[in-house]
Amino acid sequence: MAILKVAQMGNPILRCVSRPVPKEMFSDPDFQRFCDDLLETMEDYEGTGLAAPQVHTLLRVVVLQLDDAEGAEPEFLINPVITVLGENESSMMEGCLSVEGMRARVWRPNHIKVVFQDRTGKLLGYELEGFPAVVVQHECDHLDGVLYVDRCETRTLSFMREYKRFGPVDIFLDGPLEGDELDDQDVEEV
Ligand code: ZN
């Protein structure tokens, strides 16, 4: 296994559209080794998800660790297809291993269905809401060369240091918060 280098915003590879994983590739030891490396890289960078183009490989492969519980298995989404269910949107402060040290608010559909293959090639599907739906959409965007900064509210863009200090910028748009109000801000990160 190997820890791979994560491409940073500005690297053209992050703007390419990845190609589907063909049926015969699932039994290729090189492909399975790549899946192991992708997972190990995500764990090393302490990410919630990582997509193949982020490690310079233009294949439609995503790995996710949505459940923090001990023993929870990471999940591979290969050739994923997302369908939006319902019209509700929710927002979250998102970050990305390819946009180091930044956060910004992104609005996305709250309820989706994703159909995909696991790393053995088996076809699976889930309905997801809230945080898992956000992570899946964020990672699948990478497969089409889209970064969260393309979708974010640009005036919420924050450096990590300031974000940790002040919280999301947009909570100040109605006037600055004080004391306890600041502590009460409940912020989730991708
Ligand atoms: Zn990302």
Image (cartoon, helix red, strand yellow):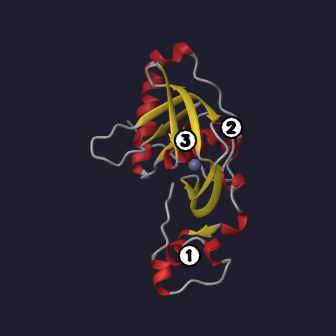
**Residue 103 position within the rendered picture, expressed as x and y whole percent measured from the top left:** 58, 63
At horizontal 54% and vertical 43% (from top left) the residue drawn is: 133
The residue wearing badge 3 is 136
- Residue 171 tag number: none
Q: Which mark is residue 162?
A: 1
x, y (%) of residue 144?
68, 37
> Mark 3–mark 2 contact, CB under 8 Å?
no
Q: Residue at x 53, y 86 (%)?
A: 178
Residue sitting at 70 percent across and 45 percent down? 12
Residue wearing tag 2: 144
Label 2 residue near ligand 1, CB within 8 Å: no
* Nearest the eye: 46 or 94: 94
Secondary element under disc 3, as helix, strand or loop, is helix
User: What residue type is disc 2 on?
Assistant: Asp
Task: Pick whichever, 183 or 38, lies toward us.
Answer: 183
Ranked by sequence position, the earlier of labels 2 and 1 is: 2
Under mark 1, the amino acid is: Glu
Q: Amino acid at mark 3?
A: Val
Q: Is residue 47 above or below residue 169?
A: above
In depth, the one of 187 and 95 nearer the eye is 187
Horizontal and vertical percent position of residue 58: 62, 33
Measured Cα–Cα span from mark 3 to mark 2: 13 Å
Local crowd at mark 1 within 10 Å, few (<14), some, or many (≥20)? Answer: few
Q: Secondary structure at mark 2?
A: loop
Among the 4 quarters of the image, the one containing residue 113 = top right
The residue sitting at the bottom extreme is 178
Q: CA distance from mark 2 to mark 1?
A: 30 Å
Q: Are marks 1 and 3 in contact (CB under 8 Å)?
A: no
State which quarter of the image contains the N terminus.
top left
